[in-house]
Amino acid sequence: MDREAVASHIPRLRRYARALVGDRHRADDLVQDTLERALTKLHLWRPGSDMRAWLFAIMHNLYVNQARARRSGIASLEDIAEPPAPGGAVDRLEIRDLQAALAAIPAEQRAVVLLVGLEEMSYAEAARALGVPIGTVMSRLARGRERLRQLLASGAGAAPSLKVVK
C-alpha cells in the first residue's frame, strides 16, 4: 500500500524536479534518487502524515546536497514547462520570460514559489517540505513573488529594444 502511495506522487515529483533543476535528465535522476531514498526509508514515514510533503522534503534535501557537491551555480531553467500544443509564439515567449525571471530569483525563494504556485502546496505543507517555519515560507513567497513581478515588468528575458536608424 505505501509503495503505491509513493508511486502516485511521481508525476508531481517529476514536475517539481524539472522546475527546480531545469534539465530533464538531471530532474529524472533527482526523482530516481528521491524514490530510492523514500523506498529505503519508508519505515520512517509516519502513517497519517502528509506523504507528499515528506517526499518533497526528501527531494529538496537531495537537491541541496547535490548543489553543494557541485558548487557550479544555479542550473538553467530551460524546458521547465512546454507551451500547450495549440500555443503560439506568444505562449513560448511568455514561458521563456517566466523561466528567465525564475532563474534570476534566489534559490530559497524559487523553491517556495514553485511549491506553492506550481505544486499548489499550502504554506504548512511547503514549510514541512523545506524544513522551515511557516513565517519563513510566507516571507520568502512574498519576496519571491514581488521580485518576479519586478523582473517580468522590466522585461526580464525580453528582446533588446531597437534603435531607429536614419
Image (cartoon, grey):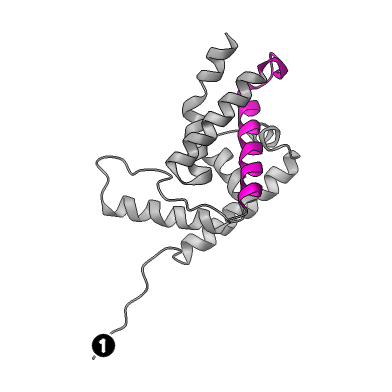
Q: Looking at the image, which residue is at 62% across and 23% down?
A: 38
Q: Amino acid at mark 1?
A: Val
Quarter assignment of residue 158: bottom left
The answer to whether residue 119 of the structure is visible from this angle is no
How packed is label 1: few (under 14 Cα within 10 Å), some, or many (20 or more)? Answer: few
Q: Position of residue 14 (x, y in %)?
A: 48, 33
Quarter assignment of residue 90: bottom left
Q: Position of residue 159 (x, y in %)?
A: 36, 68
User: Against 15, is 8 above or below?
Assistant: above
Near-viewer residue (40 or 105) = 40
Element marked by disc 1: loop
Specify the farthest residue to the front: 69
Q: Position of residue 23 (x, y in %)?
A: 45, 45
Secondary structure predominantly adopted by residues drawn in magenta: helix
Give the residue at mark 1: 165
Magenta stretch, residue numbers: 42-70
**Magenta span contains residue 67:** yes
Q: Looking at the image, which residue is at 43% across and 40% down?
A: 24
The answer to whether residue 103 of the structure is visible from this angle is yes
Quarter assignment of residue 3: top right
Q: Looking at the image, which residue is at 33% across and 44% down?
A: 83
Specify the farthest residue to the top: 1
